[in-house]
Image (cartoon, rainbow, N blue to C red):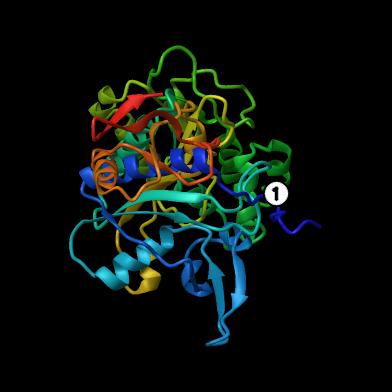
Amino acid sequence: MPRWLLPEHIADVLPAEARAIEELRRRLLDLYRSYGYELVMPPLIEHIESLLTGSGHDLDLRTFKLIDQLSGRTLGLRPDMTTQVARIDAHLLDRRGVVRLCYCGPVLHARPAGLYASREPLQLGAEIYGHAGPEADLEMVELMAASLQASGVGRVRLDLCHAAVVPALLGMNLPAAREQVDEDELFTLLQHKDMPGLRKLLAPLAPASREALLALPSLYGALRAGGGAGAAAGPAARPDGDAARPDCLARARAVLPPLPAISAALDDIQRLAESPLWARHPQVELSADLADLRGYRYHSGLTVAAYVDDRPDAVARGGRYDDVGRAFGRARPATGFSLELRELAGLQPAPALPGAVLAPWSDDPQLAQAVAQLRAAGQIVVRALPGHEPEQQEFACNRELVQHDGAWTVRAL
């Protein structure tokens, strides 16, 4: 095997793509700073019990594990940064009141999330701690929408769901019956809207609970118009396509049992959908999908997934996860979102190659001063090394520095 071959689903990032990723990273982190979010940088590796706190089986399967030669303990390479940031808020910052944190860095997956997914995503996200009310959820979802707008992806569909619905329905059963249902399998079947598999899995449950759970895959639909005609792309597993179904929450209230937890969950979704903030984001279409339970199992409330045209999978995901900080000794209300920066950068139109200035190699102090002034003004200046003609590169030189009447000046090539 050639030594230059990389592992499957691992790839180098070449200059043009790296520049697009870095420019988008700077743009989004500056956006988050304008909202008051502080940047943190969690470590790439942690003790496994800290890294996987509250995350469930899905994240465990994606985690590379190794033995620490200093302590003999099992370590994990982070597959997600959310719990790390929750640890920082709960254990290191230990502030009272609202804390807003953002982050950006690579994560590593032992298994790819999809057929063409990278096992080394570049994750960027933002989290709010210390506020349990709907205002934090609204800010989180608005910032997600603003992030996608700043990324230039065009029309976006935000699918809203709530993590409290399934546990409430399972809680209607006797403990003995509930223990016969594998919850990880249940979540997977709901995500894929696999009705035969669901009927088989849910057979031991009480009829009322079983029928309500079987109804979840059909409870989806648009909550408001937006972004022009039609709907943005979304999960390919939807059985009836993406036809607008504006009565989604009304159907949910009619079909699902009137349990307090379910009523509160549907109220959370409706409150967010009716917010006036969406007048500022006409490119966003809001939908509900009560079976869109993808992601890691630390969510405890409202969740959201963002879909764009020509992409079957979500480009960003987020939600409330109030219970994660408890394991770090300080339970805090929390909500946030993350996106895969490399994938999002790949959705942008190819930028024009930046023009650069070609400068000769010389020890002339006046030339050095001219080069320094151009670079300080934001210009790209490439020094031509002796014996090398201008070669193909990302920076196309369309100007050059030449000496004229004893002064160095820029002229077009």
Residue 216 vs residue 112, the one in the foreground: 112
- Identify the residue under disc 1: 201
Left or right of 189, for residue 20: left
Residue at image position (35%, 37%) is 147
Residue pictured at 57% horizontal, 25% vertical: 310
Disc 1 residue crowd, few under 14, some 14–19, many 20+, Cα 10 Å: some
Figure quadrant of residue 291: top right
Judge from the rendering whether residue 39 lies leftward or rightward of residue 16; answer left or right.
Answer: left
Toward the front, the furthest residue is: 405
Identify whether 31 is placed above or below 66.
Answer: above
Quarter of image, res 65:
bottom right
Q: Secondary structure under badge 1?
A: helix
Q: Is residue 202 left or right of residue 383?
A: right
152 to the left or right of 134? right
Q: Quadrant of the C terminus?
A: top left
Residue 141 image point, x, y percent = 34, 39
Among all residues in the image, which is located at the extreme top? 229
In the rendered image, the residue lying farthest to the bottom is 71
Q: Quadrant of the N terminus?
A: bottom right
Where is residue 44? Give x, y as percent.
48, 66
